[in-house]
Amino acid sequence: FTFSLCPHTGELSPSKLIRMGNEFNYQLIPYVTDIHRGRFDKSMEIISAEPENAVVSIMKKAEDNDDIILRLYETDGRDTLAKITLNMPCGSYVETDLLEQPIGEEKQMVGKSISLELKPYEIKTLRIKG
C-alpha cells in the first residue's frame, strides 16, 4: 500500500488532483537501448490534451485494425472545448461507443489536432485513422 501527501495552499481543482494521482500511480517506465536510427526525437510528446480538465485516460490500438482508440474525459464539471494534439500521422477520426463502434460522422483532423466539446464529466471515445 502506497500513498502520497501533497501539501498545498488554497483549493486544488479536481483536474489537478487527478493529474497528481496519475503521475504518482502511473510513473513512466524508461527503457535503455543502444544507439540506433529511430522514428522519434530524443524528447517528444506523443499526445497532449488541453486544457488540464480534459484528461486522456487511454490510448491503444483498435481491436479490429491498426486504428488508434483514444478515450478522454472532463474532470471539473464544466463545459470544455478540448484540444488533443497527436505527434503521429493521422487523417480522420470518429466518435465511438465503448465497443469501438462508430456513433458519429467521420471528421478530418486539422493538422495534428482534434478539437471537441466535452460536457461536464463527459467521457468520449475516438477512433483515429492514420
Image (tube, rainbow, N blue to C red):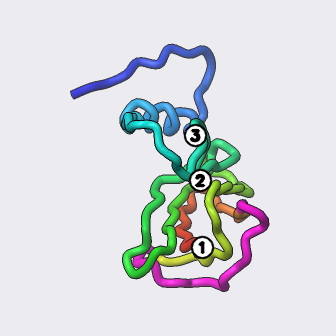
* Mark with earlier residue (1, 3): 3
Q: Is residue 75 visible in the rendered structure shown here?
A: no
Whether residue 103 appears in magenta in the rendering, the answer is yes
Residue named by callout 1: 130
10 in the magenta segment: no
Q: Give the percent coordinates (x, y) of residue 30.
A: 39, 34
Task: State whether residue 10 is above or below residue 88.
Answer: above
Q: Which residue is at a point 47% across and 19% down the rendered structure image?
A: 6
- Local secondary structure at mark 1: loop
Location of residue 92 in the rendering, given as x and y in whole percent from the top left corner: 66, 76
Whole-Å distance between the Cαs marked 2 and 1?
A: 25 Å
Q: Name the outermost residue toward the left.
A: 1
Cα distance, mark 1 to mark 3?
A: 30 Å
Give the amino acid type for the residue marked by disc 2 in the picture.
Answer: Glu
Residue 104: % across, % down: 62, 83
Q: Nearer the viewer, mark 2 or mark 1?
A: 1
Image vertical order of residue 112 relative to residue 67, above or below = above
**Image: magenta residue range:** 98-113
Quick check: 24 left or right of 116? Answer: left
Quadrant for the C terminus in the image: bottom right
N-terminal of the pair, mark 2 or mark 1, is: 2
The residue where tag 3 is placed is 15
Q: Is residue 57 above or below residue 35?
A: below
Q: Amino acid at mark 3?
A: Ser
Q: How many marks?
A: 3
Write down the residue under mark 2. Answer: 74
